[in-house]
Image (tube, coloured by chain):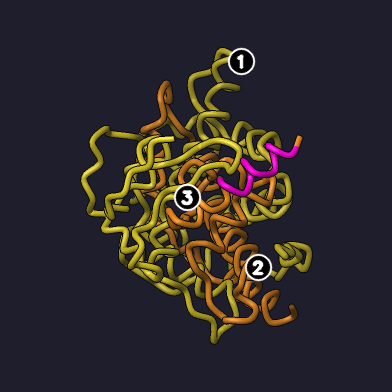
Chain colours: A yellow, B orange
Amino acid sequence: VNLQMDGDSSTTDASQLGITGEYGHYVLQSQDDESLNDHEDGGVKENYREQDIYLPIANVARIMKNAVPQTGKIAKDAKECVQECVSEFISFITSEASERCHQEKRKTINGEDILFAMSTLGFDMYVEPLKLYLQKFREAMKGEKGIPGVAVGESLGDELTDDSFTNPLPAGIITADGQSQNVMVYTTSYQQIPTVQQIQFS
Amino acid sequence: MVNLKNKIEQSNKKNISLPISRVRLIMKSSPDVSSINQDALFLTTKATELFVQHLAVSSFNNGSGKETNSLSYSDLANTAEETETFHFLTDILPKKILARDYLKSLEQMQEEEADY
């Protein structure tokens, strides 16, 4: 076994730093540094990987914070780590959906492809709530009159800009980077659907 | 447990808080992806939100969080290993181990093998 003793733990690439084998993957942690890991992720990764694009950490951290008990704390390296996991998740779902799409000789990944991918990859508990959200989203989109070119489904085409989201929704906006406008993505007649809330993650 | 459920409910009431354009960018960086329709983009963004909540809550409960009331990197790494759904994360969430601990357990294992 080739042990690397340098303290540089700025990469999580197990194949570079890690020891694999019966114990699974490990990376070495420098002996002095138990608490640690500042990921420093502005970090230069030698090889470009699709996972190198991340969602803003503030957004990710906020969702995490809302999920755990109010008084709970989240370590900085945990936030950074989830940020990476998120990109991994998106890529994971997307490749599966893309594959199905190609198999059926289609070029555009649609909603069904995504839902199918989730189901296949072990996230079927998300599917029902997502369908409900999608339904509400579609209702909100349709509710707006006089906006040309905003259609649900294949006809929308691929080059989707953020504008197409911000204009038509009277009651709700899906926020673009950094612009938080606290409105709902639902029509005014939205009624809370109890079943949506029943996601138990414990 | 009730508190956690309320938290998830509350955050579900709010608008989507992730930038769709960035989600789209990540999706497009997958090989062989040509175009993504609106539904797919919306679903992926929303699913990502659910995923973050799911991962955070599972790791928090699963790990030392309950006693320490905090979520650490190792909680996440442990959850990835122990929970089937999160297995795909094990490559990017390696567990950290001090060299001396590794050597110690390696020795122990060699000793056990020697007994056979």
Number of residues whose C-alpha sits closer than 10 Å to that of mark 1, classed few (under 14), some (14–19) or many (20 or more): few
Quadrant in the rendering for residue A115 = top right
Q: x, y percentage for residue B91?
A: 49, 41
Q: Mark 3 points at which residue?
A: A85
Q: Which of marks 1 and 3 is in front?
A: 3
Number of residues whose C-alpha sits closer than 10 Å to that of mark 2, classed few (under 14), some (14–19) or many (20 or more): few
Element marked by disc 3: helix
Q: Mark 2 points at which residue?
A: A190
Q: Distance between the residues labelled 2 and 3?
A: 32 Å
Number of residues whose C-alpha sits closer than 10 Å to that of mark 3, classed few (under 14), some (14–19) or many (20 or more): many
The three-letter amino acid code for the residue at tag 2 is Tyr
Q: x, y percentage for residue B77?
A: 54, 55
The three-letter amino acid code for the residue at tag 3 is Cys
Q: Is residue B14 above or below residue B41?
A: below
Of A184 and B49, which appears nearest the observer? Answer: B49
Of A52 and B78, which appears nearest the observer? Answer: B78
